[in-house]
Amino acid sequence: MLWQMALLYLSLKKMMFPLKNLGPNGLRLKIKTQYDCIAKNIITSALNSDEFFRVSQCASTKEMWDILEVTLEGTTDVKRARKHPLIQEYEMFRMLKGEIISNVQKRFTHIMNHLISLGKVFERENLNIKILKCLYRSW
């Protein structure tokens, strides 16, 4: 892995220096193109094969980034559509009959983690009250 990174660095370094005899605009364009190429290499090296094929035909790094952002995070409409069922599941959360406390905690944490990743903010006190109210009276 280290030798691959060193090889990538050397090839990118070699690419950065043949900037002789270009005018100011040509120099800027050359540097911008080289930085775009470097950024593309960095992004594509971090992707799995499915994501790579999704963005491999993009002309610019910005285009790659936009596609990955929508694919992995979703648009605001998608986030909103995912958030509503989770909020409903949070509000209706109850301990199931015969369920052990560790499974209740796992289900509750799973819902909370998804809601937090979608931008929902909870106060610690409200979470504690919610989990205590969902337990059977025998607890």
Image: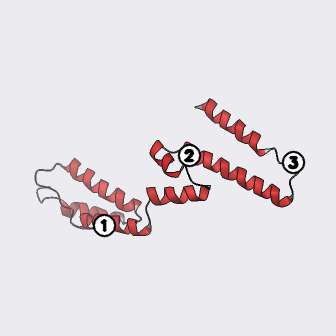
Residue 5 vertical placement versus 72 (above, below)? above
Which numbered disc covers residue 134? none
Q: Which amino acid type is shown beneath numbered disc 2?
A: Thr
Q: Position of residue 88 (x, y in %)?
A: 25, 67
- Residue 110: where, in percent of width, then height? 30, 54
Residue at (17% x, 57% y) in the render:
95
Q: Residues within 10 Å of mark 3 (few under 14, many from 20)?
A: few
Residue ranking furthest to the right: 21
Which residue position holds label 3?
A: 20
Q: Amino acid at mark 3?
A: Lys
The nearer-to-camera label among 2 and 1 is 2
Q: What's the amino acid at mark 1? A: Asn
Query: Disc 2 versus disc 3: distance between alpha carbons?
Result: 29 Å
User: What's the CA distance linking mark 3 and mark 1?
Assistant: 64 Å
Residue that numbered label 2 is attached to: 44
**Mark carried by residue 126:** 1
Circles 2, 1 touching at the beta carbon (< 8 Å): no
Seen at 55% across and 51% down, the residue is 57
Instruction: Identify which residue is drawn at 76% across, 45% down.
Output: 16
